Amino acid sequence: MVCFLVACGNNTTTKTDAPTVNVENKIQEKTKTVLFFGDSLTAGYGLEDPEAAFPYLIEQKIDSLQLPYKVVSAGLSGETSAGGKNRIDWLLKQQMDVFVLELGANDGLRGLDVQETERNLQSIIDQVQAKFPEAKIVVTGMMVPPSMGAKYANGFKEIFPRLAKKNNAAFIPFLLEGVGGVPDLNQADGIHPTVEGHKILAENVWSTLKDVL
C-alpha cells in the first residue's frame, strides 16, 4: 500500500542464455496506479490498524491476482467535497491510471447544498481528466440518513449516478451497502465501519473495480 508515497519492490534478475533482464524494471514498466481519494471511510477512521481499511484490502486482492497495479490511499478524515477540490492539485503530481472518488458523505451529513457538492465533485474529476485524460474514473455512491429529510436525501443520492453518467465513469451504487445502519458492522458512532464492515466495503468496491482493472 502506498499512502502518498510509492513503495519499492525487491531487485530481481533472471539469468538465461539471453541477455540479463532486470525483472523489477519490467514490472515497473507495467505497474499502474489506483488512487483512492476520499474521506474517513477511505482513511479507515477509528480502526486500530489503518491497514484494515478497504483500500488496503483491495490492494491485497490485486496482489493475490498478480495484477500490475499499485494502490495509493489518499483518505482524509472530515474531508468535504470543497476540501477535496482544493487538495486534489497536490495529488496530481503523481501518476494515476484509475481514480476512485469517494467523497460527499460529510457534505450530506452537514446538509450542505446538493448542487454545490456536485459542482465540487465535478471539478475534482475535471482536474484529474485534464492532467490524466486516459485515467479511468470510478464514482462511489453515497446516501444520507432519512433524518435529513426525503427531499434532501433523494437529491443527494442522485448526485453520484449523474456524475458517473456524465463522465463515463464506473459506478458503485452505494459504498456502504450491507454495512450502513447495521450496528454490529459499525463503530460506536454508528457511522464508521468496523474491521468486518470494511471487508464488506472492499467487496462492494471490488465488484465494480475488477472490471475496470
Image (spheres, helix red, strand yellow):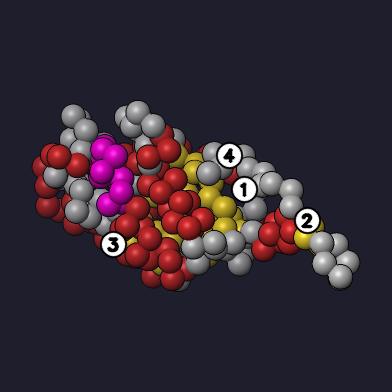
Query: Considering the numbered disc 4 on the image, is that residue within a helix, a strand or a loop?
Result: loop
Query: In terms of sequence position, does the residue under pointer 4 or pointer 1 come before the other?
Result: 4
Is residue 150 shown in magenta? no
Instruction: Identify the magenta region.
Output: 192-201
Query: In terms of sequence position, does the residue under pointer 1 or pointer 3 come before the other?
Result: 1
Q: Please name the residue shown 39% across and 70% down the image.
A: 165
Q: Nearer the viewer, residue 19 or 196?
A: 19
Q: Does the CB distance between marks 4 and 2 fall below 8 Å?
A: no
Label at residue 173: 3
Query: In terms of sequence position, does the residue under pointer 2 or pointer 1 come before the other?
Result: 2
Query: In terms of sequence position, does the residue under pointer 3 or pointer 4 come before the other?
Result: 4
Q: Does the CB distance between marks 2 and 1 fall below 8 Å?
A: no
Query: Above or below — where is 110 with respect to 123?
Result: above
Query: In terms of sequence position, does the residue under pointer 4 or pointer 2 come before the other?
Result: 4
**Marks 3/2: CA–CA distance:** 44 Å
Q: Please name the residue shown 54% across and 61% down the image.
A: 66
Label at residue 92: 1
Q: Amino acid at mark 3?
A: Pro
Q: Can residue 13 be seen from the camera position used here?
A: yes
**Marks 1/3: CA–CA distance:** 26 Å
Query: Above or below — where is 182 with respect to 49?
Result: below
Which quadrant of the figure has residue 129? bottom right
Q: Position of residue 196 (x, y in %)?
A: 26, 43
Q: Amino acid at mark 1?
A: Leu
Query: In terms of sequence position, does the residue under pointer 3 or pointer 2 come before the other?
Result: 2
Query: Considering the numbered disc 1 on the image, is that residue within a helix, a strand or a loop?
Result: loop
Q: Amino acid at mark 4?
A: Phe
Q: Nearer the viewer, residue 61 or 104?
A: 61
How would you rate the neighbour count of disc 1 (Cα within 10 Å): few for under 14, some for 14-19, many for 20 or more? some
Q: Mark 4 sits on what residue?
A: 4
Q: Does the CB distance between marks 4 and 1 fall below 8 Å?
A: no
Query: Considering the numbered disc 2 on the image, is that residue within a helix, a strand or a loop?
Result: strand
